[in-house]
Amino acid sequence: MLLKRHEWLDLARKLDWQYSYVAERDVFPEAMSGRPWLEHAEWSDWDEPYRTSYAEYVATQHEKEAAVHAVRDAVGRVADFERHDRAWLSALKLHAATLPLAEFAAVVGNLRAARFGRDGAWRTMATLGALDELRHTQIPLTVLHDLVAWDPQFDWTHRLFHTNEWVAIAARHFADELLLLSNPVEFAVATHFVFETGFTNLQFVALSAVAHAVGDRMFEKMVQSIQTDEARHAQIGGAVVKKVCEHDRAYAQYLVDKWFWRSWHFFAVVTGFAMDYLTPLTHRKSSFREFMQEWVLEQFERTLRDYGLERPWYWDEFERSLGYYHHQVYASAYSYRATVWFDLPLPSPAERAWLAEKYPESWADFAPIWERVSDRWRASGPGIEWYTHGVTPVGFCSLCQLVLSAGTPRKNSACVRDHGGRRYIFCSAPCAWIFEHEPERYAAHHTVVDRILAGEAPANLIALVRDYFGLDEATWGKDSSRGRYPWLAPAVGSAK
């Protein structure tokens, strides 16, 4: 007689045993398994709330795959995407490029936990997590492949992480440490607890709702299909954080503080751009900051309290940056738009009024920037692409590798530290703090400017974009409407 599920699942998920020929520490060395190193008896109460068997997993994933392909066949063709607003297509290109190969790196992180995680149930969940991440890699590559011939910028769905484009350098620096270099304990805290539970799990819910409002059923189904997996294997993080807190609360707090800040900067660019600039105004339900305050801050603070952890020490600075950081990076990206692989829209007067309402304490600092840009378009006339930058690149943070856009337009928060006979510049005190705690992890990494000074990359911006970033006229970013905005009347007295 076959056993019922509840009669065998607990036995199957806890496959641990005592070792006869080697010591436990040799099977699970601290360097590979992570700290604090504990005897397995300490991990034996490790538990995941939502349990599944492999057979159940396969059946569920088959249904999800069938649903994604059905939607692709129905509304995932070029003709369907041609109907979307050009700015929304840029949101799709941004997410598509930063998502799949980062997910592929997460396969490695999960497989390391599948071997060196300290409990059999943890290793089982990590194995399924690796399968999840491989699926998350394949979905956007499959869905968007047919669009490459229509718009070559979609080729960056696969190309981005293989290039030295500046966003790629920053994203790869973040993903490599988070997903490839971390041991199973740090991986679980950083990825499952902070990044997935604190950020991406909620991000995918929000973006799915935005995509539905925009009418992009393909993107909606894509992120929904991914999010349901994230919600399941994100539960690994809480179980690991609980155990680390029991034995080394200070270390757990450090990991949370470090990875929340690192995740925030990455998240602010990818999702902040999409919500506040790339979603058509008629479909914006809330600002990026409102989303962060309601869904990330409140939820994450409650979670920290549940485990007896404190808010990160820089919390006040973080909350201030919600009104500034992504706006400053967007203004930089628009000004240097030929250095990215997606187009960027110029905010209209109506959009600027919406942003002023959503960010009353900070938008007055950004309004003059967009007035100046609008004046430039009025003077040049539509269809003639121009850029506001010179021929040299901007500076980048030695930790997050993003442009030095922290602080406010009135007071930049960049700071300098000396280490090992070399000077490093950081966008903010938290980035400098992370570097100072683990300089051996970061000291050898070179920003774009470091690479130029070392002769690895050309100093001329045009050569940098073409020869080092790998962009060309067909793929580099432009103004989404090429300046053809009905509200851009020629300036009084202009020759145009």
Image: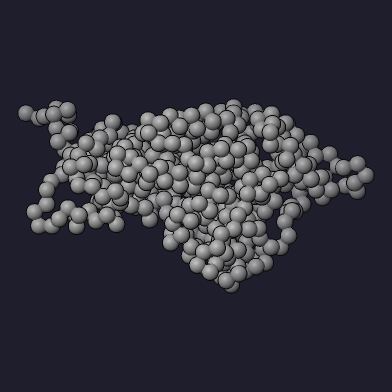
Residue 495 showing in the rendered view: yes
Residue 225 showing in the rendered view: no
Relative to 332, residue 351 above or below: above
Q: Residue at x 53, y 51 (%)?
A: 431
Furthest residue toward bottom:
455
In the depicted view, which residue is nearer to us: 203 or 240? 240
Pinpoint residue 290: horizontal percent, then vertical percent: 57, 30
In the depicted view, which residue is nearer to us: 14 or 429? 429
Query: Which coloring applies here?
Result: one colour
Pinpoint residue 83: horizontal percent, then vertical percent: 60, 36
Q: Residue at x 27, y 34 (%)?
A: 48
- Which quadrant does the N terminus fall into? top left
In the depicted view, which residue is nearer to us: 18 or 433? 433
Q: Residue at x 82, y 50 (%)?
A: 380
Pinpoint residue 119: horizontal percent, then vertical percent: 22, 43
Pinpoint residue 143: horizontal percent, then vertical percent: 46, 43
In the depicted view, which residue is nearer to us: 152 or 203? 203
Q: Locate residue 323 relative to residue 270 in the image: left or right.
A: right
Relative to 236, residue 104 above or below: below
Q: Locate residue 383 relative to residue 295 in the image: left or right.
A: right
Q: Locate residue 142 relative to residue 4 in the image: left or right.
A: right
Relative to 378, residue 386 above or below: below
Q: Residue at x 24, y 37 (%)?
A: 46
Number of labels in the image equals 0
